Amino acid sequence: MARFVFITGGVVSSLGKGLTSAALGALLQARGYSVRLRKLDPYLNVDPGTMSPFEHGEVFVTDDGAETDLDLGHYERFTGVAARKTDSISSGRVYQNVLDKERRGDYLGKTIQVIPHVTNEIKDFIRIDEDDVDFMLCEIGGTVGDIEALPFFEAIRQFSQDKPRGECIFMHLTLIPYLAASGELKTKPTQHSVKELRAIGIAPDVLVCRAEHPIPEGERDKIALFCNVRKEAVIPAYDLASIYEAPLAFHGVGLDQAVLDAFQIAPAPRPDLRVWRDVFDRIENPEGEVRVAVVGKYTQLDDAYKSIREALTHGGIANRVKVRAEWLDAEVFATSDAASKLDGYHAILVPGGFGERGTEGKMKAAQFARERKIPYLGICLGMQMAVIEAARNLCGINNAGSEEFDTEKGEKRFDHIVYHMKEWTEGNRTIKRTADDDKGGTMRLGAYDATLKAGSQVEEIYGTPTISERHRHRYEVDISYKQQLEQCGLTFSGLSPDGKLPEIVEIDDHPWFIGVQFHPELKSKPFDAHPLFEGFVKAAVAQSRLV
Ligand code: GLN
């Protein structure tokens, strides 16, 4: 039987609900409990797969192939529990399910309404696999008062009533703003936010108050009094130098204790926080620093490459160095000399991306790394660009390109070294798609195995002959070019088990040049860096000693 913690937010968005939920998950685990985290998003998109990274940040992909909110990435990074398709839902999906049922006649002619049909759908979702864990943490996206979020609030209210007393608690995250002119922290927005929540039948058990200045004892008393929350359950949350300090910081201010108290779990097992202390110590006391250039397209929004940022940090933690990642707009290289921009970096990473814009610049970055023998990690599109660059400049296939760029313009301009795959196998199923399938969910998504070439660099890095990694792409490097490219110095060191799809390429005559068709960043953890990121940062450290 799981206990449920529902996490909501008020006053403003972007207060760090996802991070707070993830840190609470880590703290409960540190006390020996099993946890699962879920995200309920009020927006009407069916999933974030079609949302622009500029607007919504990165799309996080699970092993079972769901395109989800980036908060699931936080959950995984803090708890190590692999998220599933069933851990993320949006209003769009809820309504789609309800309308599909209505069309099928499942409701037997009843009038379909938000209560009970939509709310029941949400409650069914929350209940999935509830018996698997000790604690289920469900975060509701958006803020109290959002129109789209109302059915979710109503559903969690009902859910807590359906369950026996003491099995559900509500945690609410708010902001205590600081007025510089009067030098005061203001509690009124929090009071209003809780009032709004109580008006829809939810009384928070724990209040997490984000503040940029220490909350004095008196203000804490006031918040407790006016919001009808126990004083020990008013938890301050201050800005942190690193997000990975969050479990220790929240433990320090009593978050996990407040949650256990709310469930009346006493005495509670003591937490073992050694892993987080070690992570934090490595972040606080680095023994060096490396500079990594990330040459991408979505460089304006921090969250667009969230997992890559974090995975680089993890690579730094594993090597006890600080990784200073600098984000360079690939388009700049198309017109200027790459060398002038890339000189002085200890490693170059080209991340995933969609569309032709910026790709010539990404190829220049790959060429620069290859020729100057700078460590290079190409991820997804970054691998495809490295292969096309090698095809053009090492093998003399001058017109090498990707079908993706032709499709955009509707004419054949390139030799398709990278082509649009229309059919592939997933386990023992054959998946087919046509050029005009819907944009949503038509990619090769989720975990696929790859077989590593004996004696290759990646086999040494992973230390195993078979790996499983997460994918999110439509196009593939054409295996029929393997022989030709290998003769020019590019080794296909990882292939799909049937040998048809190139998964990894590397260059032998180079200290560290690896391109991967999958997204290793999605599986990296602060306490267990992904081997490719650990190896990449290690190569950057070696490079930093050369220059
Ligand atoms: N646009 C490329 C493809 O669809 C790469 C995708 C990615 O980098 N995630 O294959």
Image (spheres, grey):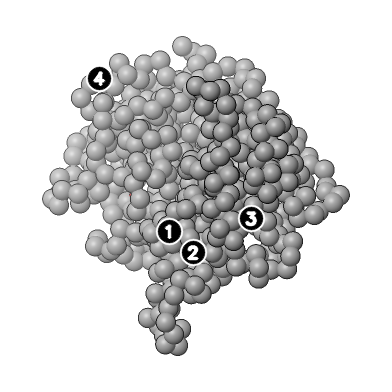
Kindly check if marks 1 and 2 are in contact, taking CB atoms under 8 A apart as contact: yes
Q: Position of residue 61 (x, y in %)?
A: 47, 51
Give the amino acid type for the residue marked by disc 4 in the picture. Asp
Position above or below: 101 against 349: below
Residue that mark 4 sits on? 337
Give the amino acid type for the residue marked by disc 1 in the picture. Glu
Residue that mark 1 sits on? 148
In front: 368, or 410?
410
Position above or below: 458 against 80: above
Q: Earlier in the sequence, mark 1 or mark 3?
A: 1
Kindly check if marks 4 and 3 are in contact, taking CB atoms under 8 A apart as contact: no
Q: Earlier in the sequence, mark 2 or mark 4?
A: 2
Q: Residue at x 44, y 85 (%)?
A: 110
> Of tags 1 and 3, which is closer to the observer?
3
Residue that mark 2 sits on? 151
Q: CA distance from mark 1 to mark 2?
A: 7 Å
Q: Position of residue 40 (x, y in %)?
A: 51, 57
Q: CA distance from mark 4 to mark 1?
A: 48 Å
Looking at the image, residue 84 sits to the left or right of residue 495; the answer is: right
Looking at the image, residue 409 sits to the left or right of residue 280; the answer is: left
Give the amino acid type for the residue marked by disc 2 in the picture. Pro
Q: Earlier in the sequence, mark 4 or mark 3?
A: 3
Kindly check if marks 2 and 4 are in contact, taking CB atoms under 8 A apart as contact: no
Q: Quadrant of residue 100?
A: bottom left
Residue that mark 3 sits on? 203
